[in-house]
Amino acid sequence: MTGRPPGSDRLSLNQATVKRLDLAQSVDLCVRHEIPAIGLWRDRVAEAGLRQAAATVRAAGLHVSSLCRGGFFTHPDRAERASARADNRRAIAEAAELGADTLVLVSGGLPSGSRNLALARRMVGDAIADLVPTAQRLGVRLGIEPMHPMFCADRCVVSTLGDALDLALQFPAESVGVVVDTYHVWWDPRLAAQIGRSRGRIVGVQLCDWVVPLPADTLLGRGHLGDGVIDFPPVVAAVRSAGYTGFVEIEIFNQDVWDAPADQTAATVRQRFASLLD
Amino acid sequence: MTGRPPGSDRLSLNQATVKRLDLAQSVDLCVRHEIPAIGLWRDRVAEAGLRQAAATVRAAGLHVSSLCRGGFFTHPDRAERASARADNRRAIAEAAELGADTLVLVSGGLPSGSRNLALARRMVGDAIADLVPTAQRLGVRLGIEPMHPMFCADRCVVSTLGDALDLALQFPAESVGVVVDTYHVWWDPRLAAQIGRSRGRIVGVQLCDWVVPLPADTLLGRGHLGDGVIDFPPVVAAVRSAGYTGFVEIEIFNQDVWDAPADQTAATVRQRFASLLD
């Protein structure tokens, strides 16, 4: 390993980028590649056991930039909604135990059988309102992540950073913010303005590239920085100008990346981050 | 054929819905199914010959609700840009000859090799400015169609109705307007507000449904009205409230629809339109 390039001290590797590794392996990988922070996923945390996961990360000296993820609030059935909220309260407790900077929330899509987008969006606000007291009590910041409009129907009715921010602004800044993921928001002509509006509310930043053509599974059309069309430096400069001092995660859902050796992936993540953003 | 349901006198069939038919066959299909208007595509018009196409449509008593399409302005090379503009001037002349209500413009994506979205968007405005005198002289209205943000990189950098309208408002209303296609804009929380702002500028309306999951080719993820998640009546009510009195096209890109017998497709188009919108 050569010396850490300047700026890379705010680099974080989201576990989803090395999907095949378990929590301990992901932590080791970060340590080997001098990546100082990690974004964790709940399934891998559960697999390791929450206390053990927290201990492993702490012993390695890693910062936890996010826990992925809560949300999926938009159930048509009352009991399912209650169950989703209970699960989100558990996720908040996990984020607190792990010392995560934010619990990432993906809202959920249209309720099954419904075409009522406005209703779905209200359901998201209601659910977050229900979670805020728990978040406040445990000192966790919820991060509302807008997802690309192509996921609006089936995954996330919060489609732009502006919409996510409008939701977040209904709640105290210490408990609810927004997560900026370039894959979801890069196309938005209002992105720079909305990042500016988000001062004090950005609780997470995730980067990956938009690669064309989209693959059959549009969830997996993400690439290493530089492999696609996104112009990263202005986005990162904008979040910094808006006061964000936290870690910048690399989160890549891509079958080829998952199939590559994890050390190669980590090296590419570091190299691309340094060459584009340092 | 039973009697035409009320409201269906503003129904138009876009040729792309019956992709396998040539112009004369599409015209015959509309006549057989008492669909009073048609949206034409330039390749099928060219195949028939422009004058012959215009004569065929006129002889059948069909209205031409749109000609698809011009645009694709965002070439990095000056000669290519000039060539695209020349092709668009030919498209305007074709729209005039056919008596089309609008020439639909799809802007084009990021210039090859570029990550500069703002530049691409300026190139679109510049190109339209260049075309307006021709459109004015020939009495053709250019219709800027926003496309879904998932096509921003490779097909259309105009991603929302608001963006399309902001572009259109730079030019005279008799020459430049916007096209509202539900597939591209249904997800937008600002859709109703932007349709309201579009008073006097809506020059075309196209409907098809958003079907989940998306197919491998996201261009083909469109369905018959009612097969997906879009709530059509509020959109159609909003464009009517905004003063749009023109035809409403059904335009469905979908391999299964293309593989179905055209008469079955036309019957489904009429039936769904009537049951949802009359």
Image (cartoon, coloured by chain):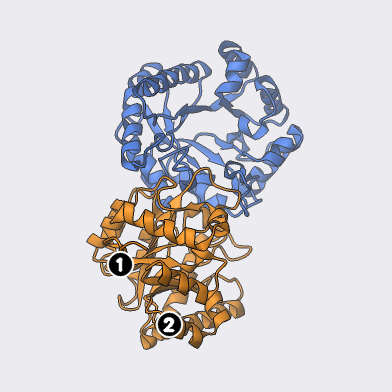
Chain colours: A blue, B orange
**The one of A153 and B152 positioned closer to us in this rendering:** A153
In terms of sequence position, does the residue under pointer 1 or pointer 2 come before the other?
A: 1
For the residues labelled 1 and 2, say whether their Cβ atoms are less than 8 Å apart: no
Front in this rendered view, residue A265 or A217? A217
Mark 1: secondary structure = helix
Residue displayed at 60% across by 29% down: A37
Give the answer, above or below, for where A72 lies relative to A270.
above
Say the numbered circle drawn on residue A62. none
Residue B262: percent from left, percent from top? 51, 63
Q: Is residue B174 above or below residue A214?
A: below
Q: Residue at x 53, y 43 (%)?
A: B213
Q: Which residue is mark 2?
A: B98
Report whether residue B139 is seen.
yes
Query: Where residue B81 appears, x then y in whole percent?
Result: 56, 77
Q: How many marks?
A: 2
Residue B84 percent coordinates (x, y)? 55, 78
Q: Chain of mark 2?
A: B
**Which mark is in front, 1 or 2?**
1
- Chain letter behind tag 1: B
The residues tagged by marks 1 and 2 sit, at their Cα atoms, a distance apart of 20 Å
Residue that badge 1 annotates = B9
Kind of residue at disc 2: Leu
Q: Amino acid at mark 1?
A: Asp
